[in-house]
Image (tube, grey):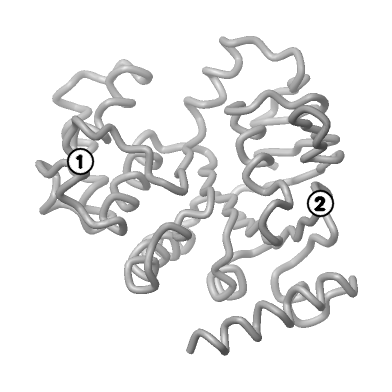
Amino acid sequence: MILRAEGIRKSFGDAEVLRGIDIEVSKGDVVAVLGPSGSGKTTLLRCLNYLEAADAGVMYFSGEHYDMTAISKKEIAGIRKRTGFVFQNFNLFRNKTALENVTEGLVTARKMPKKEAAEKAEATLAKVGMAGWASHYPSELSGGQQQRVAIARAIACDPEIVYFDEPTSALDPELAAEVLSVMRMLAEEGMTMVVVTHAMDFARNVSSRVIFMEHGAVVEAGDTKEFFSSPKEERTRIFLRKSADAGEKMI
């Protein structure tokens, strides 16, 4: 077990966004987090990586126990060194090349020598099909290319787990397919991933486990095959039926 979090709660003002979420992730898992917009999926991911401070909850990460409301900056930095995060809107440094975007974290956070960091970054960009674009700035790249650079940045530090926050929602279908292909490759290599996504084919065919959320709570969670073939909750069945209908209308 790499990660177990229990009782995560988060409110913004009077709006309770997370209502006591539990999540478990084992080594090699690809966990797809599904649910309608506004269900708290992104907030969950941000709390797990301490981009947002949870109002309640405990976390067990890589054998260590943390009170999510009383964690130190040093502990947060230690967790982030062992995780990667891919944002919906890429979050690349606009004034840095693709190569520099990947080396930045290796040099500043990992204190890796610049030459070694550059070699690592070049290899990682090649892994995601971006070797020929290392000297290009984000403004010179398509959205799909930018997201592949963002993935390279997230995996360059060999993280124990990578969080993906709707990595294809800002992309058109063709560019989304490029990114999902890279994610599928990483999954096949055994990378541990938690993926907030609306890409149902990816969830069905690549993930090993699914969490379905609504109104800040987990409605249903379990093995992917069972989730899609024999959902236990009526709300899950409605969600899957509507998702299937929407997919058919797009074809």
Q: Amino acid at mark 2?
A: His
Q: Which residue is the site of mark 2?
A: 215
User: In the depicted view, which residue is nearer to us: 124 or 147?
Assistant: 147
Q: Position of residue 138 (x, y in %)?
A: 21, 44
| Category of crowding for the residue at label 2, using alpha-carbon neighbours closer than 10 angstroms: few (below 14), some (14–19), many (at least 20) | some
Look at the picture and state if 205 lies above or below 142.
below
The residue positioned 66% from the left and 77% from the top of the image is 243
Q: Residue 230's quadrant in the figure? A: bottom right
Q: Which residue is the site of mark 1?
A: 98
How far is the residue under mark 1 from the one under mark 2?
38 Å
Q: Position of residue 231 (x, y in %)?
A: 83, 75
Q: Amino acid at mark 1?
A: Ala
What secondary structure is found at the residue carrying circle 2?
Answer: loop
Q: Position of residue 25 (x, y in %)?
A: 68, 47
The residue positioned 90% from the left and 74% from the top of the image is 234
- Could you tell whether 129 is left or right of 72 in the image? left
Q: Position of residue 242 (x, y in %)?
A: 71, 79
